[in-house]
Image (cartoon, rainbow, N blue to C red):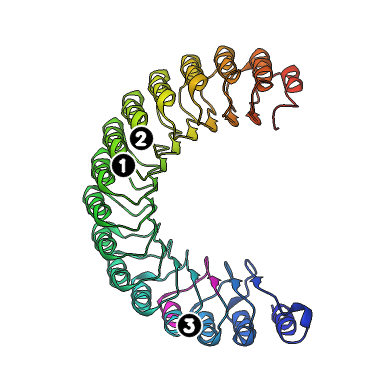
């Protein structure tokens, strides 16, 4: 590490050809506090560095103290990444003090540290005053509802932060309530990530109310939160009124058919959502019926992910009908369901009429040679589909050849096939398929 810092000093201070150095990554090097101290001496004088990455370096509060002092003087650094270190509340306090004076830093990544509630308190105070920070990553930092309360105070006054990641903390009911209250007033945050934030019935209700009033949030990630049908009802109601959210991630939850019904109803009215991820839930054919019906009317959703659910050929029939009418959807992901041969037939029929879908993922869906033939027939006519994923199906040589022939009739660039294809069929497709 001594050599690294010596070289940095030489580069920025001595050699003219290196005076434009803008990014330095010293991640995964175990430089520790002593190494950071040496690095900071160069940082105090540097006039060109904008990105500094120090992830996974065994940096503790002592090392961050040196960084804080350097940030008070530095006038060029825009991005500072300190993830996967040993930074606690004292180190966060040092950074907070620096950010009260620093006027250039826009991105601060403290994910996977031990900031805790006390550290969140320091950062909350920073948000009240700081006018430059736009991205704050506090993923996995042992922050509870008390820390969320401190952050709420900062968010209610802050006018610059646009991205906040509080995933994998223990925010709980009261914490979500605090954040929801903040969202009702905050006018700048556009992206909020709350992976595994312990969101239940009451928490979803608070979030839903916030979404009804919030006018700026565009991306909300609620992955892995145990959200079920009741919670989906609150979120669906919010989507009926919300006019800004365009990306909603509800993957890895417990949403079933009833929840899908609530979300489908919302999609019939919502005019802003463009990306919806419902992968790895418990939605079967009945639930997809509601989503399909909504897609017949919805003209904004462009990306829909339904992978790893329980969708069979009947559910695909509903989606097929929607695709015949829908003019907005460009990507449909049905990976790891039970589409089967009959489902492939429904999709094929839809593709003959659909003129907007660009990507269709059918990985691991029990599609055999007959299903491949139905899809190939559609490809003979379809002129918009570009990517078709058919990994882990049972297409056989005949199905592969039929798809290869169909490829010659349209503009499709990629047909991803599977390991079950014979040696012959793999030779039949090299001009049309990527390996």
Magenta range: 78-94
Q: Secondary structure at mark 1?
A: loop
**Can residue 311 be seen at all in this image of the molecule?**
no
Q: Secondary structure at mark 2?
A: loop
Residue named by callout 1: 270
Q: Position of residue 150 (x, y in %)?
A: 29, 72
Q: Considering only vertical position in the picture, is 145 above or below 405?
A: below
Cα distance in 3D space between marks 2 and 1: 8 Å
Residue named by callout 3: 102
Q: Secondary structure at mark 3?
A: loop
Q: Considering only vertical position in the picture, is 124 above or below 303?
A: below
Residue 202 or residue 362, whichever sits in front: 362
Q: Considering only vertical position in the picture, is 350 above or below 233?
A: above
Residue 179 got which mark?
A: none
Q: Residues within 10 Å of mark 2 (few under 14, many from 20)?
A: many
Q: Position of residue 164 (x, y in %)?
A: 40, 63
Mark nearest the camera among 2 and 3 is 2
Residue 79 shown in magenta: yes
Residue 298 got which mark?
A: 2
Q: Which tag, 2 or 1, sits closer to the chain's start?
A: 1
Quarter of the figure that contains the N terminus: bottom right
Q: Considering only vertical position in the picture, is 423 above or below 244?
A: above
Residue drawn at (75%, 26%) of the image:
430
Quadrant in the picture for residue 197: bottom left
Q: Which tag, 1 or 3, sits closer to the chain's start?
A: 3
Mark nearest the camera among 1 and 3 is 1
């Amino acid at each position: 590490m001594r050599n690294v810092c010596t070289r940095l000093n030489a580069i920025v201070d001595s050699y003219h050809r290196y005076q434009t150095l803008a990014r330095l990554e010293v991640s995964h090097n175990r430089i520790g506090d002593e190494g950071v101290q040496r690095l900071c001496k160069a940082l105090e004088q540097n006039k060109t560095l904008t990105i500094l990455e120090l992830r996974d370096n065994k940096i503790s509060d002592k090392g961050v103290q040196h960084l804080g002092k350097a940030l008070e003087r530095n006038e060029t650094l825009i991005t500072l990444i300190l993830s996967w270190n040993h930074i606690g509340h004292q180190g966060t306090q040092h950074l907070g003090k620096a950010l009260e004076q620093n006027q250039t830093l826009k991105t601060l990544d403290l994910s996977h540290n031990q900031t805790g509630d006390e550290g969140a308190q320091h950062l909350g105070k920073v948000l009240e005053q700081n006018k430059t920070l736009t991205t704050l990553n506090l993923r996995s930092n042992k922050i509870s509802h008390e820390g969320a309360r401190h952050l709420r105070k900062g968010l209610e006054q802050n006018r610059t932060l646009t991205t906040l990641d509080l995933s994998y903390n223990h925010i709980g009911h009261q914490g979500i309530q605090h954040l929801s209250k903040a969202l009702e007033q905050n006018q700048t945050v556009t992206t909020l990530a709350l992976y595994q934030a312990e969101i239940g019935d009451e928490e979803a209700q608070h979030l839903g109310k916030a979404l009804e009033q919030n006018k700026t949030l565009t991306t909300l990630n609620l992955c892995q939160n145990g959200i079920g049908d009741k919670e989906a009802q609150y979120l669906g109601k919010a989507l009926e009124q919300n006019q800004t959210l365009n990306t909603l991630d509800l993957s890895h939850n417990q949403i079933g058919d009833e929840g899908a019904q609530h979300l489908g109803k919302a999609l019939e009215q919502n005019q802003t959502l463009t990306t919806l991820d419902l992968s790895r839930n418990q939605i079967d054919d009945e639930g997809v019926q509601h989503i399909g019906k909504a897609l017949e009317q919805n003209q904004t959703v462009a990306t829909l992910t339904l992978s790893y659910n329980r969708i069979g050929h009947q559910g695909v029939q509903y989606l097929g009908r929607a695709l015949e009418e829908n003019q907005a959807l460009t990507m449909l992901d049905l990976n790891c369901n039970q589409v089967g041969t009959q489902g492939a037939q429904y999709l094929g029929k839809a593709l003959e009429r659909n003129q907007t879908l660009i990507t269709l993922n059918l990985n691991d869906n029990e599609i055999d040679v007959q299903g491949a033939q139905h899809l190939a027939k559609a490809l003979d006519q379809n002129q918009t589909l570009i990517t078709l994923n058919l990994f882990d199906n049972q297409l056989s040589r005949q199905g592969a050849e039929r798809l290869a022939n169909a490829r010659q009739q349209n503009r499709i660039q990629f047909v991803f096939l599977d390991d079950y294809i014979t040696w012959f069929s793999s030779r039949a497709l090299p001009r049309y398929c990527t390996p």
